[in-house]
Image (cartoon, rainbow, N blue to C red):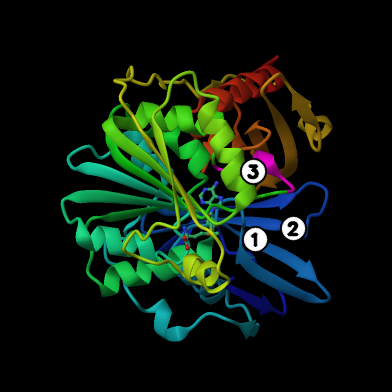
Amino acid sequence: MPHIQIKDFREVAFPCVHDGVEFDFIASNVKFPDDKLICAKSEEKTFLLQLKHTQEKWLLKSDKVTRVSPNLHIKRAIQAYADKAGLETLFSNLSEKELHHRDKESALKRIDFFAESFPEAKEIWIEVGFGSGVHLLHQAKENPDVLYVGIEIHKASIEQVLKQISIQKLDNVLLLDFDARLFLEFVPSNLVGRIFVHFPVPWDKKPHRRVISKAFISESIRCLKKEGTLELRTDSENYFAYALETFLALTQSDFRVRKNQDIGIISKYETRWRGMEKNIYDITLTNHELSLPIENSFDFSLTGKCTADLLKLNGSTHRFENGFVHFERLYTMNTGDYLLRLSMGSFDKPEHLFLIIKEDEALYFPSQPIASHTNFQSHLKLKALLYG
Ligand SMILES: C[S@@+](CC[C@H](N)C(=O)[O-])C[C@H]1O[C@@H](n2cnc3c(N)ncnc32)[C@H](O)[C@@H]1O
């Protein structure tokens, strides 16, 4: 994680620009004023830097909720702030060489890219949890006419595969750092040719975190075009049994089960399991349905004067049938407005984000919640809590 340690912290005059990075505001935690957030913008990516005071030193690093990839933007912002404020650096893990490297159009997209206008020009294939990317890179190379969307939540894997996409000069891959279970809600109906879920984490002790569920299969069927496939591959006997039961629970389905099949490419995980002589199971579902288009135009605006006592709400959790809103932290901004860190949405797929509360409106930061049904219910709950 990019960071620097500094002796003393100094505030710059906000807003300002330095070395191509814009710094818009600073905010201080109302309970712990030495916990601060600085808003940075580098090449259209907006995120927060976090400043913490520990053992007579200050640590300037990336905030977890708004963290962007590639982390080059974070590194540039930390360095630019340190230079602008003339901070005395005690330790830095930012590399000089990397800081001066300029980005080409990145294959890594934000969820907004897909939520605003899903690319539909080419056939779409989706890989959930691509890990080391061996299967993803192989399929993208073999199928240049397909647009391959890889979804992963592990940052180091994303960075590694981004490098490979650039080295191998692949122009038909888009990556997304997002929970795949939430992503499918944004995919138009009847569009996708293949969805791969290879060696998902079995989560034997936390089954609610599993990718495969009844809801995920139903959403996959909606996204798949006619004769499109959802392809699960697993080495876990438990996960296989669970998945089989879940596929069978559908009122109507057409799927095929195979054992120890060679699929022409062996991922890092598969190499490990083969070495241990474990069985490998495939469940391939074929869709025969034509689904209705999705409806997800939700209004996430919050206008008017906030009437709630924010200090009282700070730290509280508000539940409703399918989800919740949790007021995690409250900050005061240099502009006189409030910044609220929230988690909201469904219990197993919560979203973390910020809200800037101004005199006569409130704005989600850095972008509004993803337009899912549960997020919208959480938004309505939040609206009622803030505006009565
Ligand atoms: C066991 S690894 C398998 C990686 C790869 N498919 C392979 O065969 O080598 C599972 C991967 O799924 C990712 N993952 C787990 N839950 C996810 C989710 N909800 N959305 C996207 N990726 C997820 C993990 O970060 C991990 O990289």
Residue drawn at x 56%, y 63% as measured from the top left: 278
| Ligand 1 within 8 Å of the CB at mark 2 | no
Residue drawn at x 60%, y 82% as measured from the top left: 92
**CB under 8 Å between callouts 1 and 3?**
no
| Position of 378 relative to 280 (above/below) | above
Q: Which residues are magenta?
A: 205-211
Residue drawn at x 74%, y 41% as measured from the top left: 328
- Write down the residue under mark 2: 35
Q: Nearer the viewer, mark 1 or mark 3?
A: 3
Mark 3: which amino acid?
A: Arg
Q: Which sits in the foreground, 81 or 233?
A: 233
CA distance for labels 1 and 2? 7 Å
Residue 214 in which image quadrant: top right
- Write down the residue under mark 1: 50
Q: Which sits in the foreground, 258 or 263?
A: 258
Residue 221, x across and y down, in percent: 39, 29
Residue 232, x across and y down, in percent: 45, 46
Q: Which sits in the foreground, 193 or 119?
A: 193
Which label was assigned to residue 209? 3
| Ligand 1 within 8 Å of the CB at mark 3 | yes
CA distance for labels 3 and 2? 31 Å
Label 3: element kind = helix
Label 2: element kind = loop
Please tell me how crowded label 3 is: few (under 14), some (14-19), or many (20+) other residues with Cα within 10 Å. Answer: some
